[in-house]
Amino acid sequence: MLTPKLLTTLPQSTPNSVLADLVAGITVAMVALPLSLAIAIASGAPPATGLVTAIVAGFLISALGGSRVQIGGPTGAFIVVVHAVIAEHGLDGLILATLMAGVILVAAGLMRAGSLIRLVPEPVINGFTIGIAAIIALSQLPDAVGITLPAGTPAEALERLPAIWAARGTLDWASLAVGVGTVVAIVALRRAFPRFPGLIVAVAGASAAVALLALPVDTLGARFGALPATLPRPAIPEMSVARLVELLPSALIIAFLAGVESLLSAMVADRMVAGQHRPSAEILAQGVANIGSALMGGLPATGAIARTATNVRAGGRTPLAGIFHALTILVVMWAAAPLAGYLAMPALAGLLLVTAWNMSEPQHWRGYATAGRVSDRVLLGLTLVLTVFADLTVAIGVGVALGLALRLRRRDVPPAEWTPPDR
């Protein structure tokens, strides 16, 4: 079914439910604002692209999606892919790859391909997610502790780890204090006030301390300049057959990540609100959202599990909450863009360290290590190692292929029990 949940829920809305969605949308926007900026910076893109993605894609995912409470936007899962595409093909290459991914997702949605998520083995998803979380943490560690890496330091883990150790003498104590203080504040606020948007309070508080105390800490404005106060004009990226072929592998990876993460997020949301999402409608919405984000110069987008959970905890129950979330970010962008220049880079890095930790779901590590089949644990570990030390495409390809092979083998009769017929 491709009918958006908005059309199903809107006739049932009441003034009280709309007010609840408005409060939830504003709450989620306060979480999404610093995250969107931090994710864009970590991806090697201009900070404003994160806000553009949260506004445009967030609006379209909620307006057209198949989940009641899904919140969409840029997510940590894309950081590694986006960084690699920008490094190899430039920002214009990323925009074209995102546009292509959107077209692929629209086609998948129209072909009712949403149910194919079940074919991806769970150990592959878990290993891939933990691996991405490790890469994000590694990428943010220098900013969080104030270590200055030489220009051109590779992003690959095998080369970045020795570079961080070699540059340990450049550690800046003020940046370290801001980064660690932000992490502690986020964790403390989350435990003390689970429904409160502690992310924005922690990052804003740390940045205010940097400004008031005149600490020698790098800020968003100092590194990237002022943020724009308006959305850019839509533009179609330059295309050629050679360019499309060159970017097709990146587009497929973006489409895969967007589809898998959005459906996983929708399934988590279903359990939280006792609902049932429409997978093909969700995939179709992700496609339209990525096309819209690309035309506005934004990043790849998908459903965000953490922001969706925040929406549910804040009282959001219909797609209106996601629409209000996007509109709130737009209003803040118009009204307070200059203030974003004061955000401290170690505070944003600390925010992403917490995001990476939560993304890896450490509460499940013991279960991964002890429960299930040995082959599942090996598959998880292999996918994790390939994600961190090799390549995302290789990790996904090898993980899915081995996972499907193991699944088929379990359904077949074991070779030892098979007897050839007499001839």
Image (tube, rainbow, N blue to C red):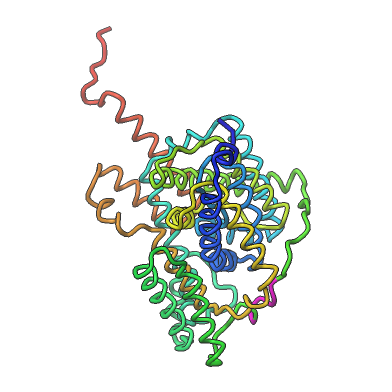
Q: Nearer the viewer, residue 351 or 407?
A: 351
Q: Nearer the viewer, residue 273 or 52?
A: 273
Give the percent coordinates (x, y) of residue 208: 54, 84
User: Where does the magenta region start and end?
Assistant: 222-227
Kindly identify the residue that appears in the image at 30 percent across and 58 percent down: 363
Q: Is residue 414 magenta?
A: no
Q: Nearer the viewer, residue 252 or 222?
A: 222
Give the percent coordinates (x, y) of residue 125: 41, 47
Q: Is residue 225 magenta?
A: yes
Q: Is residue 229 above or below residue 219?
A: above
In the picture, the quarter occupied by the N terminus is top right
Kindly identify the residue that appears in the image at 36 percent across and 45 percent down: 123
Count up the numbered dots: 0
75 with respect to 120 (left or right): right
Kindly identify the residue that appears in the image at 67 percent across and 77 percent down: 338
**Residue 369 visible, this orientation:** yes
